[in-house]
Image (cartoon, coloured by chain):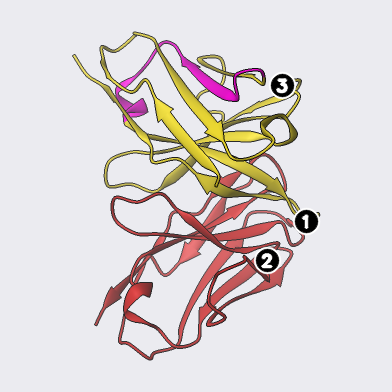
Chain colours: A red, B yellow
Amino acid sequence: DIQMTQSPSSVSASVGDRVTITCRASQSIGNYLNWYQQKPGKAPKVLIYAASSLQSGVPSRFSGSGSGTDFTLTISSLQPEDFATYYCQQSYSTRTFGQGTKVEIK
Amino acid sequence: EVQLVESGGALVQPGGSLRLSCAASGFTFGSYAMSWVRQAPGKGLEWVSAISGNAVTPYYADSVKGRFTISRDNSKDTVYLQMNSLRAEDTAVYYCAKDYYSGSGSFHDYWGQGTLVTVSS
């Protein structure tokens, strides 16, 4: 099975900060990597698919990059509504989520 | 408007069984694979199972293989998750999700609100 490891597990940041979250796969997955945002008590929402494609309706401050085993989600200027937990997910072989990264208010 | 509505969550004893349902609307149901994803209280997301649009191919996480069975009825626009031999560690909110194939893998583009399964004596 493919394992997904995110870092950091949590990050404290201020509005306007640039935030970067990384995700590493245990084997090469090409660009079969998605990013989701989840707020407390709500279902997740897809932000980025195929490593770098922005889902319709998602603000352009969110971007994704990477291929193979190493991937990055970047929030260019953190907004109040972005405080949430973020998950990566591989779809190369069945599906696996990373353990999540909580973005908290500093 | 795409809607996914899960039902069937309940309190069940260890070793028991439960069947979850997810009623879909707002899209051509039989054209899309569907998945179940769960989240234990205070924990992260865990993909559980998926089924192709034509119901031919099911997929399972190792943690549920042999205990859970996914199925779908395209005439009723509904996907099911039959859960047998339930364990305490199966306690979670179970989400139904629609899969979208992008050409570079797939992702869950719509999610239900979730249904809570509690396994406890």
Q: Quadrant of the N terminus of chain A?
A: top right
Which residue is labeled 3 in the image?
Answer: B55
Q: Is residue A105 magenta?
A: no
The residue lying toward the viewer, choosing from B21 and B16, is B21
A43, above or below A23, in the image:
above
Q: Residues within 10 Å of mark 1 (few under 14, many from 20)?
A: some
Q: Amino acid at mark 3?
A: Ala
Is residue B82 among what the camera can see? yes
Q: Residue at x 74, y 51 (%)?
A: B105
Farthest residue, direction bottom:
A16
Q: Secondary structure at mark 2?
A: loop
Q: Chain of mark 3?
A: B
**Residue plotted at (56% across, 28% down):** B62
Q: Residue at x 42, y 30 (%)?
A: B6
The part of the chain drawn in magenta is B75-91
The quarter holding residue B33 reads top right
Q: Position of residue A53 (x, y in %)?
A: 69, 69
| Amino acid type for the residue under numbered disc 2 | Ala
Q: Which mark is residue A51?
A: 2
Q: Which badge, 3 or 1, is on the more N-terminal residue?
A: 3
Dot 1 and dot 2 residues touching (CB under 8 Å): yes
Residue B83 within the segment the image draws in magenta: yes
Q: Which disc, if any, is residue A70?
A: none
